[in-house]
Amino acid sequence: MKWILTIIAAIVIFLTGFFTRNIINPQSSLPSQSILSPTPTRSIFTVVEVLDGDTIRIDTGELVRYLGIDAPEKNEKMIEEGYATFYTIPKTRKLKYADRLQRAQQWAKDHHNGMWLEEWKTK
């Protein structure tokens, strides 16, 4: 009989602690602030600057990083790895690093990187 009362007392103490934990420490049931994400909203912004392959600046001055991708930080690197091609618009001023970008593209072609892989396979 004594062991039954001990078990019942243990269950009552356990249940009391379980149901009063939010009264004593209401924050304990909430996820930590570091994993909360803002609620997305649908808005239209203008891109004013492309900082690299996965980060832009919008017209509010805020930086926006694309989630789910990691792109090389420099255009030159994207061309060298075969993920982009060098392109200029005719009758515009000469790009400061045009020669470097053209060399990077040739290197990608010579080493069959990225989009240039198929060219190597068909030979």
Image (spheres, grey):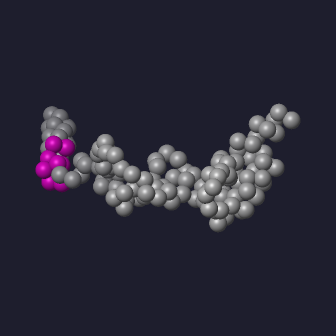
Which of these two is toward me, 119 or 25?
A: 119
Residue 114 position in % (x across, y down): 70, 44
Is any part of residue 119 visible from this angle?
A: yes
Q: Is residue 113 left or right of residue 19?
A: right
**Which of the 4 image quadrants contains residue 75?**
bottom right
**Which of the 4 image quadrants contains residue 8?**
top left
Which of these two is toward me, 38 or 99?
A: 99
Measured along the vertical axis of the image, is residue 80 above or below residue 96?
above
Residue 7 position in % (x across, y down): 20, 38
Quadrant where the N terminus is found in the figure: top left
Q: Is residue 107 left or right of residue 2?
A: right
Q: Residue at x 51, y 52 (%)?
A: 54
Magenta-colored stretch includes residue 20: yes
Measured along the vertical axis of the image, is residue 76 above or below residue 2?
below
Measured along the vertical axis of the image, is residue 53 above or below residue 97?
above
Q: Which residues are magenta?
A: 18-25
Determine the residue located farthest toward the right in the rendered image.
123
Magenta-colored stretch includes residue 57: no
Quadrant where the C terminus is found in the figure: top right
Q: Is residue 111 left or right of residue 79?
A: right
Is any part of residue 64 visible from this angle?
A: no
Q: Residue at x 71, y 54 (%)?
A: 80
